[in-house]
Image: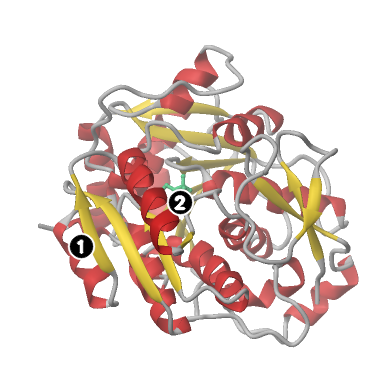
Amino acid sequence: MPTWRLECSACLPTRSRDASGLPGVCEECGAPYLVRYDALPPPEAKTLLREERWTMWRYSGWLPLADGERPVTLGEGGTPLLHLNRLAERHRFEHLWVKEEGTNPTGSFKARGLAAAVTRASRAGARHLVVPTAGNAGIATAAYATRAGVRARVYAPNTTPRVICEQIRAFGGDLILIDGHIGDCGTAAREYATQSGAVDVSTLREPYRIEGKKTLGLELAEQLGWRVPDAIVYPTGGGTGLIGMWKAFAELRQSGWISGTLPRLYSVQAAGCAPIVRAVESNAERATPWEHPTTVAAGLRVPAPLGDRLMLRAIRESGGGAVAVSDETLTAAARELQTIEAIDACPEGGAALAGAIELKRRGAILASERVVIFNTGGGWLYRS
Ligand SMILES: *Cc1c(COP(=O)(O)O)cnc(C)c1O
């Protein structure tokens, strides 16, 4: 089982600390910490994977789990990778897959990150968690907190889809609706954490959600026979999925599990909130906050992500890019996934398909390439 340290993603590699207690962001500069393992499994360990069950914990050698520890789990991960025959033909892709994350417990890929974060927080003695969310992270925090026997306070915008609010409450989350966006919820959550002692499990304000999200990339590589795709098109809000996969592929290559060119990572955002697209287009190192963010894709309504620098690094180092799509286009694409392939896509999943089509139209992705899009959650969560 792994041992690890934490390394600041900005003062790197000069500033690192041990992983004891409940680490937040870098004490010096406020940037997120990343987990660095003392050793990763050797390629010979591939054959041992066959014995493991299909949840994200089959990759326990890559995850922050100490000797003898059991994770807080609902069986997250192990989601299907499905070839989209009809949509590929319709939009002229030779190889187009969807990673269907709507089949996770709690209905979205947020289950992966929160399973890891709640495991570490509860092992460190936290009895009370708090999270700001555009919706799905609130469901996952409430569910995994309950599973761990601890309490969860959730701050979400008052525009959060009704079913998502119901799911947060159903799993015992103490839901507070805020007149504002996820950034405003973050301010309220931090105030509450200071005043109550609750542990903040916001995106990148603790280092373990990224590790859970990393299993998106590990699983994808294994499902493709350890031959990674040419391009990944991912709907981006806070950026944990993108950063997690980038870390996964880097670690897989470093440990000799894969070789050759890593996938190009493409971020798709909604036209009404596209800070990362704007930063990529203007070649900036940081994103500037998006004014008046609006989109039906709740998970993409993140105007000032803390992980902007890491996302931009992942996009540039992988040779990828970023594209914005309108609410109308992403909604139509989600419907295509539903009616043509029976994938119950959320609006964010629709954005991934719409983004892949647009990137191919621009020539950034070729028709002959192997392309994977992500449906990050279930469409049922967004029904009124
Ligand atoms: C949170 C969320 C996103 C964005 O996730 P990040 O990986 O943090 O950028 C996309 N889709 C859905 C359904 C989400 O809940």
Percent position of residue 72, x then y? 54, 80
Residue 109 vertical position relative to residue 67 in the rendered view, above or below: above
Residue situated furthest front in the rendering:
195
Q: Which of marks 1 and 2 is in front?
A: 1
Graded by Cα atoms within 10 Å as few (under 14), some (14 to 19) or many (20 or more), the crowding at tag 2 reads: many
The label shown at residue 374 is 2
Quadrant of the rendered structure where residue 78 is?
A: bottom right
Q: Do tag 1 and tag 2 residues touch (Cβ < 8 Å)?
A: no
Secondary structure at numbered mark 2: strand
Relative depth, front residue between 162 and 33: 33
Relative depth, front residue between 216 and 132: 132
The label shown at residue 165 is 1
From the viewer's perspective, is 97 left or right of 22? left
Percent position of residue 148, x then y? 47, 82
Residue name at image x 30 percent, y 22 percent: 291
Q: Does the residue labelled 2 lie within 8 Å of ligand 1?
A: yes
Kind of residue sitting beneath label 2: Phe
Quadrant of the rendered structure where residue 284 is?
A: top right
Percent position of residue 237, x then y? 42, 41
Relative depth, front residue between 213 and 80: 213
Residue 139 vertical position relative to residue 24 in the rendered view, above or below: below
